[in-house]
Image (cartoon, grey):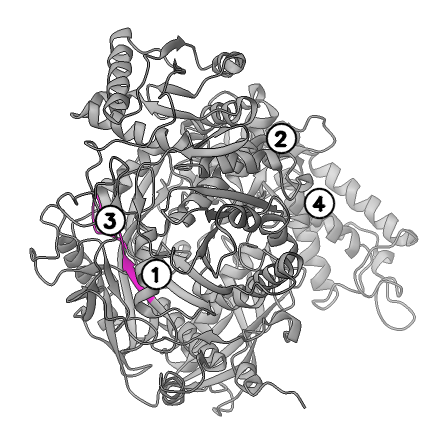
Amino acid sequence: EDINPRTEDMAECEPAPKRARTEDGGTSGFVEKSEADTPPSLPVPKRPGQGMEGKGVQALTNHYRLNIQLPMVLHQYEVSISEKGDGENKFDILKCVKLAVMEALEKRLGGGYAHDDTCIVSPKKLKDPESGMEEDEMSLLVDVPKPNEKRRRQFEVKLHLKKTVVTRQIVEAFNESSNTSAATPYADSGVLNQITHYVNLLNKVFQHGPRQRMAASKGAWFYSAAERQRLNLSAISHLYRGFNQNVKFTADGLILAFNSGGGAFYKDMWLHELIAQHPSLDARAFAARSQQELKKVDNFLKHMRLKVTFPHQQQRRPQQPEQQRKAPRLAETVRGLAFVEGTKPPRPMTVDDVTFLSPDAQALLRQMRKAAKERNGGTKSDLIGWAAVDQAFAALHERNSLREKPLPQVRALFDALPAQRIAPNTDGTTGNPDMHDGTTTDNASSDDASRVEIEALVAAVSPPTTMGAYFQERYGITLDRNAVLVYTGSGSRKSFHCLEHAKVTVGNRKLKVDPQETAGMINHTSQKPQDRRKLIDRLLRTEADMGNDPVLGRRSFDIEVDENMLSIPARMLPPPTITLNDAGKKAEHRGTPGEWQHHDRLFTPIPGGLQAWVVMVGDRIPQREVDDLVSNLTEAAKQSGMSPRAPEVVWADRGDLPGKLSALGARLLQLVVVVFQQVAPSGVYGEVKRVCDVELGMPSTCVVMKKFSNTKHKLGYCKGVMLKVNAKLGEYQAKGEIIGRTVNWEVDIGIRAKKTMVLGINLSHPAGGTGLSVFAVNCLMDFGGHKYSTRYHTSHLRGVGVGGLGVQELEAMLGGDDGLIEEFVLRNGTPERILVYRGGVSESQFSQVVATEVPALRKVVTALSQAKTSGEWQPSLTVVVCQRRTGTRFFPPEAGGPYVSARHGNFHAGLVVDAGIVNRAVFDFFLLSTPGLQGTSRPAYYHVLLDEAPYGADELQRITFGLCFAYARCSKAVGCVTPLYYAEAAAQRVRLLNAPFFEDRWSDAPSSSAAASAAATTAGGGAGGE
């Protein structure tokens, strides 16, 4: 009787049902999702109205209006695929099925549909090819040529009409739900779910064309692999230019967000050359590599797509037309290095470790199989000896990926088998009546006899051979006996390939880029706003080519894209008041809002100044350059009011750097400055921070000599270093009580009047998808924006950044006597409001945060209230998600103007957009809070998931903008609120300090650590460390 009135709407918009995976990698049947699999639909705060603060401006954005002919209907078909017969491996099956379904449905529909691997979106119902009638369910048989073979693979494709969505109904429901004059302060979550599902279907329609002709990546990015779109990044990587597109349902209707960009991809080169030239992999021979290096290579190779080309195929003459009609060999996915089983430590497999049947023996087995099927009328279940033949073939496929043409004389050898072995049984069938399914049994004596005869025939033709001997005998090519192998597939479909024969295919994304590649990507992709605007318009017309896309044309979905950027209303917020601590003087803004001059101001330093500090040189750097750096650092500290004494210079090599740092523990030092010639590798940098943070417990900072030498303003560079140093020195105590703290500046954020506690929750995921995810919670401990404290938690599963924080985890970080809430109360008293900024969440995961983390936060606060004040303290809770990696950009309509930077061409910091391209039904806004240094500035997108205060639009936008000025590492406003930046820095520091522990023993890692939490809190004492 207590039924949620939105249950029916939720049922209409459930995600696609899970499909059961079969052993061969296909899918069979549909498994409906249970109620436990679908997160509950919770209310989302409505927009409290548009903000009014600031001066109104017009801005262009990279969003394009979509013109849809109503009532457009979307038919969503779920696809279930199962293979008839033997396949190769599930990766090839999925690729073949995708191509087969596309070809089969094009013949049946005449084009005009969109699909991916799991579903089909069509503007009309599919017609059965035999009856010509529209059907909700049908089953089709699709034949696909096997790679490099004449045989074909057959698949059964089942189509099931899961949902029909009418655009007119979606628009009407959205308009009714987004009525801001309604009495309820929450948006209708059922309608929001319908809109999300509808937009996902439209995205499949728009992504279908680019996915067929371009390299696709996560996040709806599409890259052109054409030579004209490639730019060289390094010896092993290219930069592919591309674009990103997403459909959005906004206050102005349906729009297409379209953005330009670039991605790093591996070059199409031989795999052994790629490994040898990779900067992070050992270039020595595999026999000389340590187990750790072998593990790095194994992890690097996983999921690499490659094509296998044998030496004899490289030397072939041009194919004849009839040969060119054969199906091309599909790219295979590497599972990793092949290791010899039973060896400790594991030894990489070489060409001499793989033995398989000779070409003649392979041909014999193939011909025996063919003859057996012919003798028995095309079936295999009733023939004695068939199981042995099948078993031999399974071993062949497991140990060898080479396939040769059969020899004509093999049929005669098979005919030499005794005739009684295939004599009819009493029931008229042939063979053993107990073996009608082709399986093997140990008790079948006739089968054993047949196996012996078959093995004897195979041995008579040719004994087993190694891979090296095979190439020498067959092609006269000598392979390196130490050549290491990789493997593809699994189980009976596992295949081994020599590194020298594997070539990396076009489209392998390089996820981890080094500093050189990062600099190259920035130089190639960063453009001033006016240039980027022209590039986006050109890509929309040429590369995306939506005007000529048949799926979007009149004969299909009939969607037209307006090729003019949207012009939207925006506002320029005034910057907050920034106060430096020399006699309370207000800072004057330098040039543009969002930047201020600190070089002529004094910090609030520690008593007595910077008296005990050491400069440790970790590389071979000339003495005069080190003296110049030390002189400028001392002068910068003096001008900043830190009253420094000349530091002691200690020389060390990278090898003995940890030991030299540890030796400083006996001295009471305030600071250690470590100097490197170039940016130090993560391992060296992590060891420096581990020794200083964990062993010594003293602040440290790293300086890159190359940056200092190349800058024209060396003193200004050193003042920037002292800016971070002064914040890191943190609080100073006397008799156990805090008597002061180092301060760079104070910001009037607007949270003092109502005593607001600001939290930032962010996370750090492991690279490669395995390892520990680290959650960090950062708390602003004062109202001036310069004192922070941090706690962290680790989780064993990647992807639990959403819904991974429950009551126990938040209680460990926020509750208790040493939790963040208790620390805040001791400093400032009980807060009236708690404002939480959450990072690392996509729009599709908002409902999970609302369903799991928001109730957990409320339970923790309620429990603390009961324990401390018997329930009298009831602070309001507000949760805001911040998305920094948004594809939205804002462009001035014309160059120049009072709110446009003359140097960069970007809008000044403070541009806020809460109309036009935002969701009219919910509380969200874009904020461009940074002036930008290079290229086009990127705004942050804020989405309010819970608002118990409640905040008005102007108040929340003003507080959010003020928090962007509290970053102590630079005298500029940053791209998102400072607590999120510090939480991210703390999570990365925890990972850095525990890197060996996380990589080798992550499954046994604890959920929290006081030592690492203290290290993170040290960062929060000021700038968060460098």
Residue 171 in the image: above or below residue 897: below
Residue 119 in the image: above or below residue 936: below
Q: Looking at the image, is mark 3 or mark 2 nearer the viewer?
A: 3
Q: Looking at the image, is mark 4 or mark 2 nearer the viewer?
A: 2
Residues at circles 4 and 2 in contact by the CB criterion of under 8 Å: no
Residue 707 in the image: above or below residue 452: above
Residues at circles 3 and 4 in contact by the CB criterion of under 8 Å: no
Instruction: Write down the residue under mark 2.
Output: 349
Please name the amino acid that badge 1 sits on: Tyr
Q: Looking at the image, is mark 1 or mark 3 nearer the viewer?
A: 1
- CA separation, marks 1 and 2? 50 Å
Q: Is residue 127 magenta?
A: no
Q: Looking at the image, is mark 3 or mark 4 nearer the viewer?
A: 3
Residue at (63%, 87%) from the top-left corner? 3
Residues at circles 4 and 1 in contact by the CB criterion of under 8 Å: no
Q: Decide if residue 1020 is in sight here.
A: yes
Q: Badge 3, how many Cα within 10 Å: few under 14, some, many 20+?
A: some
Q: Which mark is residue 962?
A: none
Instruction: Write down the residue under mark 1.
Output: 941
Residue at (38%, 57%) from the top-left corner? 883
Instruction: Write down the residue under mark 3.
Output: 229
Please name the amino acid that badge 4 sits on: Ala
Q: Looking at the image, is mark 4 or mark 1 nearer the viewer?
A: 1
Residues in magenta? Answer: 925-938
State whether the magenta stretch is mostly helix, strand or loop. loop
Q: Badge 4, how many Cα within 10 Å: few under 14, some, many 20+?
A: some
Label 1 element class = strand
Q: Which quadrant of the figure has residue 344?
A: top right
Residues at circles 3 and 2 in contact by the CB criterion of under 8 Å: no
Q: Residue 355, position in %: x, y?
A: 67, 34
Query: In terms of depth relative to the viewer, which is nearer, 828 or 96?
Result: 828
- Earlier in the chain: of badge 1 and badge 2, it is 2
